[in-house]
Amino acid sequence: MRKVSILGATGSIGQNTIDLIARAPQDYDVVALTGANNIAQLASDAIKLKADVAVTADEALLPDLRDALKGSGVEAAAGATAITECATRPADWIMSAIVGAAGLAPGLAALEQGSTLALANKESLVCAGSLMLETARANGTRILPVDSEHSAIFQALIGEQMSAVERIIITASGGAFRDWPIEELAGATLDQASSHPNWDMGQRITIDSASMFNKAMEVIETHEFFDISASQIEVIVHPQSLIHALVGFADGALMAHVGPPDMRHAIGFALHYPDRRHLPVERLDLASIGTFDFRAPDEQRWPALRLARETMEAGGMMGAVFNAAKETALDGFIAGTINFVQMAEVVEQAMAHMSASDGHIDATMTLDNVLEVDHLARKAAQAAIHSRAG
Ligand code: NDP
Ligand code: MG
């Protein structure tokens, strides 16, 4: 039996992971499940999967979690420290599917104990890519990408040499506002931004898809994870979300990964790696699909793509700034304090502020320094939000 833990078990990725694990309970010994607000889901899954411990991020919810777990034998814990601690409980495979920079410390803890880390939490690579990869190396373990594009790239690279890679192309659906007139974007509502044409995901990543901040994060994630230069990474709009990424080689060949927009594919690949096993996902009927559509991304519509490039050019800890400012701007949009197009303005302003402030971006990348930069960038983004709301 493989020992597994799921960080962010109550979310969209976490639930898809549980769906796969619950189909073969005899294969898995579940150690820890974590969540935040959704105590009912967390408790019922922990009981169903016979987890050792269930942890909520919110300390105020510990009594509710204890209540829900009463008599089950599942231990209850709460708080950010408890989440990081549960990631240090020995496990062979840990899913990192917390949303936001809150996933960084638990992901590092999982790597430090030598677990294979299935990484959906792209924020940790954007904030601290070299720290994550170095921690994996130092502890003799590996990170397996779960973001669909990165799983696709990883699969296209099996048996290949990085030196023969000319370019990596990641696809973007274009999100909710792909076809909107640009001048109407400022009026986009939270509801409109929260619905995705193809994928069923958590609210935050769905809004990030509409603004292309998700793709911008994924470009940085590609740069960090595959150690490939920014100039070799391309984004193409592919409204159907069937091709997830393509790798271009020195001989002009493109290897594409094609599959239905179902995260259980990338999760299952990381769960069974290096094997491939049966997965309960749709089999595509190419004749009925007919054509694959592509178009160039428009940087006027999606300034996040330009900001990603600037982030990679700046290097150092600008990724932590980019992510923290993006998270803060997204909070501002969700709260109704800024409009949809102001999110990119806020991120750009926070990046400018942080590159002008001495030394922070170029400091050594340690967890403490990343968290410090994250904190300062959130303050800068807050100030940018207030100046707009004001
Ligand atoms: P969800 O919002 O659906 O789930 C997030 C999870 O994190 C939930 O378990 C939530 O708990 C928990 N959580 C929220 N805040 C905190 C916190 N401060 N500390 C600890 N846990 C917290 O997100 P998704 O599943 O959509 O995304 C998870 C990650 O995977 C993100 O990094 C996202 O970018 C990435 N990803 C997601 C894809 C998708 O298809 N959904 C595709 C590719 C990548 P609760 O719900 O109980 O409050
Ligand atoms: Mg993705």
Image (cartoon, helix red, strand yellow):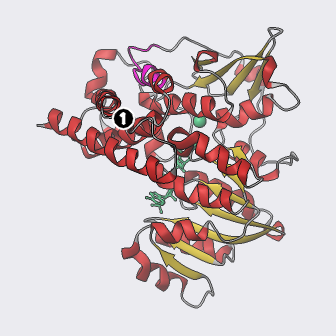
Residue 338, by quadrant, is top left
Residue 250, by quadrant, is top right
Is 122 in front, or is 38? 122
Q: Is residue 367 visible?
A: yes
Question: Which residue type carries mark 1?
Answer: Gln
Q: Number of callouts in the render?
A: 1
Q: The N terminus appears in which quarter of the rendering? A: bottom right
Q: Is residue 259 visible?
A: no
Q: Position of residue 288 (x, y in %)?
A: 73, 22
For residue 274, above or below residue 17: above
Q: Position of residue 345 (x, y in %)?
A: 29, 26
Residue located beneath label 1 in the image: 192
Q: Position of residue 317 (x, y in %)?
A: 47, 37
Residue 43, by quadrant, is bottom right
Q: Residue at x 53, y 52 (%)?
A: 104
Check residue 307 for magenta coloring.
yes
For the record, the magenta segment spans 298-308
Q: Residue at x 83, y 66 (%)?
A: 27
* Direction top: furthest residue: 252
Q: Residue at x 46, y 66 (%)?
A: 80
Q: The C terminus appears in which quarter of the rendering? A: top left
Check residue 187 for magenta coloring.
no
Q: Residue at x 47, y 85 (%)?
A: 67
Is 221 in front, or is 23? 221
For residue 138, above or below residue 332: below
Is 260 in front, or is 141? 141
* Direction bottom: furthest residue: 71
Q: Report crowding for label 1: few under 14, some 14 to 19, many 20 or more residues within 10 A (C-alpha).
A: few
> Element at badge 1?
helix
Q: Position of residue 81 (x, y in %)?
A: 48, 69
